[in-house]
Every structure is written in structure tokens, then in C-alpha cells.
Image (tube, grey):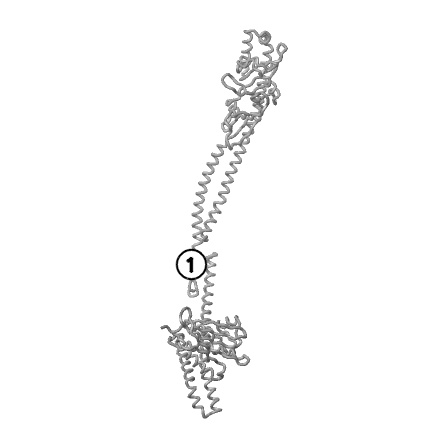
């Protein structure tokens, strides 16, 4: 992710993060406060309903006492109970209905001591039906009131009922009376449309269930089971709908999203402008820095800014100045090293060309002292060696004058060059050098001067490796035809019985400027490797400490 993208993202997060936290906190606070209000309203209504039920119970009890007193004072009722004539029987059957209407009850029935209904106001035809458990259960109910399931000629209904008793003509009787508990009754208990009151009985709910997710409280009311054999618990459920809270949440969410989107858009615009203002000089600085390399250090870094970007620009300018100075010093050092390398290589090549001449003059001096009469014949014999060495030095001079000429490719007879080299180097001690030349060796395609320098370096190093060898040792030069990469090649092997080299010494020897000889330049093997590779050949070494070394050169042969 780029710096500008990170800056944009960070700015948006910093702006929108607190806004999101604030919005969610406000939303949660509103929901918590309204829910607490709803819970308080539900609890208050539950208390009101509880008090209203107690008031209803007291009112029902008062009306039942009035009916009881009226029944005790009613002589006609007493006569109907004792005589049971047809006219009195009709009065008895209608007594509960008339009394129920006068008392404002929804249900009223008179039962004798055996639980037989002698008069029913809500359903006249229930006369003579046995229901002995109802008065007993109502009397045992907490606070003497319970829900009772009754029925009219049309349908059953639920009533909030109490029981009272009296004695008439020496016999016990009970009055069971109550008011209807229906949807209208429950709606009367809930003055607010947001509050829902329902009755949950064992059999069914008498009103629609409370809305899901609302604030709910309940009030336990005893009820007589349908079989009138036991008391069960019914619940008056009070619930507050959260529709208002949901609507408020929806409005808050909508405006919060609008505010968030607007703030996000403004934040993006501000962040884009700010990030562009910050990243533009950094981008320009990076582009200028990317143009710098060792061959192009003229890039200018200057700034009048007083902030961190200006300080960074000036720091890069100072670094570029130091790089320019360092590059100049490095080029000068490289030039000096190159001149030193060239001087060492010239010195090495000239020494190789002077060795045969030195050997010839030493031989002539020895002949002049010991056999002066043969001096002319020996000089004539060794004249070719001197002339060959002089020609070699002249060729070197011409090559170095052109610094690095293209090699003059030609056909070279490897065996002839090896024989000539041995004749020039081996006069001091012919027993040291041994030749094993292959017959009919194909000619190679290379520069004769390159091949001669290669052989002189390898043979010279091999002879130097014998200086500390007990018994003198020997150097063997062999040639053989081979196939290299599927093409014919000539192999030249220079093997000595000297002290050999370790792996570390071998790696250093090819690296240049490593020598174990006093006055050596350390360039011999590095020159050999370069010459062989330039000629399209290969070079490998087999060596072991104490067992000598073997240098194997393979050069491609003349095609055709």
C-alpha cells in the first residue's frame, strides 16, 4: 500500500471512527432510556391492575353481601325453598337472574349445601346441575377471588367471581357471583394504546398475545380449572410494544447513515487534498532519487522548505555531492589500479620474452670461456632463438601500443610451438623437460602469439614449482587430440612433480596478484585463463599438495 493510500485510510478512520462511536453510543443510550421508561410504565400498570383487581374483588364481595341479606329477608324465596310449588318454582328459577341484573353481575348462581344449582342467572337451564367443587375452590382461593369459566345459552365466558354463603330455613346455601373478563374488560385495564393487556389461562389466551420483543410483565391470578376440581394459575400479561422505539431507531439509523456518508465524503475530499499536498513533493523526490546511478550523479536536490521534506531534500543533495566526490576518487583509483595491472602484465610478458635471450647469452658466455673456438658455431645455432624472442617482444610492443588488439587468428601447429618452446627453455637442464607429443595432431585456430604466451606461462610456472623439490623433479608437456562439446580439439597438458597447491591457493592463483615467488607479479595464471577463454578454449587444473599440478588446456581445432 502506498504512502498516499495509507494516509487516506488513516484520515478517514480518524474522522469516521469517533463519529461511529458517537452514533452507536447515542443509539444505545436512546434505546436504554426508552426501554427503562417502558419497563417503568409496564410495572406501574401491573400495580394498577393489581389494585383494580383488589377493588373489583371488594366490590363483588359487597354486592354479594347485599344479595345475601336480601335473600335472607325474602319470605317468598323462603316459601319457594320449602314448598316448591309450580308458581314458587318459577320464582326460584328466575330469582338469580333478577338479582344478577340488579347487582350488575355477569354471572350469579345459588347452590344448596350439596352443591346443586337451585337458580342460575346467567344460564337458567343450569337448574339442578351439581357443581359442589366451585364454592369450595373459590373459598380456598387467595383473597377469595378467582377466575371461573361459565356459560350462557349462547357461549361460554370467563368471569372474575367470589363466593358468599347464607342459611335459609335451617339449610346452607351459597352465592357465586362475578363480572365478565373479556377483551373489553382487559382493554379497560390498559389506558394507553402502546400497552397491551392479555389474559393467559391454562386453556387459551383471552386476548391477542403480547407483541414479540416488547417489555413484558405479568400478574398471577388464581383460576378454577375447567373440571372444577382444582385451582390453577392464570396470568394477566402486560406488554409494552417497542414499535415506537423501533421507529425511532430506524430514524436515528437513517440519519446516522446519511451523516456518516456525508462526513465520509468530506473526509475523503479533505484526505485526498491533504495526501496529495504531502505526497506530491515526496513523489517528486523519489523520482529524482530514482534517476541517480554511478554514471549519472548530476541530479540536483535543492529546496527552500523549512519542514521535514526540505530537510530530507537537502540531505539527499549532500549525499549526492558525497557520491560524486566518491565516484571521482573511485574512478581515479580504478585508473591507477588498471595502470598498475597493465604495468605488471607488461613486466611479466617482457620477463617471459627475455628469459630465452638470457639463457642464450649465458650459454654463449660459458662457451666463450670454455671453448672459444666453437663460439661462432654455437652462436649460429642459437641465433634463431634470440631472433624468435626479439620477434616475440616486438609483437608484444605492437599489441600494447594498440592496448588490446583483436587477436590475429591463424592456423597453429601445437607440436611445433611446444618443441620450439622446449628448445629455448630447456638448454640449461634438458633432463627437466619431457615431451609426449601426439602424432598427426590437428592444427588449432588461434593467434600464435596467444598460444605461445599461454605455453610460456604454464611451463614457466611448472619449472618454478620444481625449485624446492628434492631431486629436481620434472615437467612433462603432452599433446593429444580430443573431442570437446562434440567438436575436435587439441589438448595440451603441462604436468609437474612439484609441491602442488591447496584448494585455497588454487582459487587465489586465478584471482590475480597472488604469487609465492620472490619478485613474481601474480598475473601468470589469470593471464593464461583470459587468453584461453578469448581463444574459445577451456582450462582446468588437477592438483594436490605434495603431488604436483597438472594444467589441461583444450583449444578448438581448425575446421574442415
Q: Position of residue 267 (x, y in %)?
A: 45, 46
Q: Residue at x 41, y 69 (%)?
A: 486
- Residue, disc 1: 287
Quadrant where the C terminus sits is bottom left
Quadrant in which residue 350 is drawn: bottom left
Crowding near the residue tagged with mark 1, few <14, some 14–19, many ≥20 C-alpha atoms within 10 Å: few
Q: Nearer the viewer, residue 227 or 141?
A: 227
Q: Give the number of marks.
A: 1
Q: Position of residue 81 (x, y in %)?
A: 59, 9
Q: Position of residue 443 (x, y in %)?
A: 39, 76
Farthest front residue?
439
Tag 1, which secondary structure? helix
Can residue 492 be seen in this snapshot?
yes
Quadrant in which residue 448 is drawn: bottom left
Q: Is residue 115 above or below residue 10?
A: above
Farthest bottom residue?
373
Q: Is residue 141 above or below residue 509?
A: above
Can residue 400 be seen in this snapshot?
no
Amino acid at each position: 500500500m502506498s504512502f498516499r493510500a495509507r494516509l487516506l485510510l488513516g484520515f478517514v478512520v480518524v474522522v469516521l471512527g469517533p463519529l461511529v462511536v458517537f452514533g452507536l453510543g447515542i443509539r444505545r443510550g436512546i434505546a436504554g432510556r426508552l426501554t427503562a421508561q417502558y419497563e417503568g410504565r409496564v410495572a406501574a400498570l401491573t400495580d394498577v391492575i393489581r389494585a383494580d383487581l383488589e377493588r373489583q374483588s371488594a366490590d363483588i364481595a359487597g354486592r354479594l353481601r347485599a344479595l345475601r341479606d336480601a335473600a335472607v329477608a325474602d319470605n317468598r324465596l323462603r316459601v319457594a325453598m320449602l314448598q316448591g310449588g309450580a308458581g314458587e318454582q318459577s320464582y326460584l328459577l328466575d330469582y338469580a337472574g333478577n338479582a344478577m341484573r340488579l347487582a350488575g353481575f355477569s354471572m350469579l348462581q345459588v347452590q344448596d349445601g350439596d352443591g346443586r344449582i337451585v337458580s342460575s342467572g346467567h344460564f337458567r337451564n343450569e337448574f339442578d346441575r351439581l357443581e359442589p367443587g366451585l364454592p369450595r375452590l373459590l373459598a380456598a382461593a387467595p383473597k377469595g377471588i378467582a377466575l371461573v369459566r361459565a356459560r350462557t345459552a349462547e357461549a361460554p365466558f370467563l368471569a372474575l367471581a367470589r363466593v358468599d354463603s347464607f342459611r335459609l330455613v335451617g339449610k346452607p346455601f351459597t352465592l357465586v357471583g362475578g363480572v365478565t373478563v373479556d377483551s373489553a374488560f382487559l382493554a379497560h385495564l390498559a389506558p394507553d394504546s402502546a400497552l397491551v393487556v392479555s389474559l393467559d389461562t391454562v386453556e387459551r389466551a383471552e386476548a391477542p398475545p403480547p407483541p414479540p420483543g416488547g417489555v413484558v410483565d405479568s400478574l398471577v391470578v388464581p383460576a378454577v380449572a375447567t373440571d372444577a376440581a382444582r385451582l390453577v394459575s392464570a396470568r394477566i400479561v402486560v406488554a409494552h410494544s417497542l414499535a415506537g422505539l423501533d421507529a425511532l431507531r430506524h430514524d436515528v439509523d437513517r440519519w446516522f447513515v446519511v451523516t456518516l456518508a456525508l462526513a465520509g465524503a468530506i473526509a475523503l475530499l479533505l484526505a485526498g487534498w491533504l495526501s496529495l499536498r504531502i505526497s506530491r513533493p515526496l513523489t517528486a523526490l523519489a523520482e529524482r532519487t530514482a534517476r541517480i546511478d554511478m554514471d549519472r550523479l548530476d541530479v540536483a536536490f535543492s529546496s527552500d522548505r523549512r519542514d521535514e521534506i526540505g530537510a530530507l531534500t537537502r540531505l539527499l543533495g549532500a549525499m549526492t555531492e558525497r557520491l560524486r566526490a566518491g565516484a571521482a576518487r573511485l574512478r581515479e583509483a580504478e585508473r591507477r589500479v588498471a595502470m598498475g595491472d597493465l604495468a605488471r602484465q607488461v613486466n611479466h610478458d617482457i620477463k617471459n620474452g627475455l628469459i630465452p635471450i638470457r639463457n642464450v647469452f649465458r650459454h654463449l658466455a660459458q662457451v666463450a670461456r670454455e671453448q672459444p673456438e666453437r663460439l661462432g658455431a654455437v652462436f649460429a645455432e642459437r641465433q634463431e632463438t634470440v631472433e624468435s624472442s626479439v620477434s616475440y617482444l616486438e609483437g608484444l610492443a605492437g599489441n600494447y601500443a594498440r592496448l588490446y588488439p583483436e587477436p590475429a587468428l591463424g592456423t597453429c601447429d601445437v607440436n611445433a610451438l611446444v618443441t620450439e618452446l622446449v628448445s629455448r627453455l630447456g638448454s640449461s637442464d634438458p633432463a627437466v623437460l619431457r615431451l609426449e607429443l601426439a602424432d598427426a595432431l590437428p592444427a588449432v585456430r588461434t593467434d600464435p602469439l596467444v598460444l605461445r604466451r599461454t605455453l610460456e606461462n604454464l611451463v614457466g610456472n611448472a619449472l618454478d614449482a620444481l625449485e624446492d623439490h628434492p631431486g629436481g623433479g620434472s615437467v612433462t608437456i603432452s599433446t593429444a587430440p580430443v573431442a570437446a562439446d562434440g567438436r575436435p580439439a587439441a589438448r595440451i597438458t603441462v604436468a609437474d612433480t612439484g609441491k602442488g597447491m591447496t584448494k585455497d591457493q588454487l582459487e587465489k592463483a586465478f584471482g590475480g596478484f597472488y604469487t609465492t615467488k620472490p619478485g613474481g607479479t601474480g598475473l601468470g595464471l589469470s593471464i593464461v585463463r583470459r587468453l584461453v577463454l578469448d581463444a574459445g578454449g577451456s582450462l582446468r587444473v588437477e592438483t594436490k599438495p605434495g603431488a604436483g599440478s597438472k594444467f589441461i588446456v583444450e583449444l578448438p581445432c581448425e575446421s574442415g
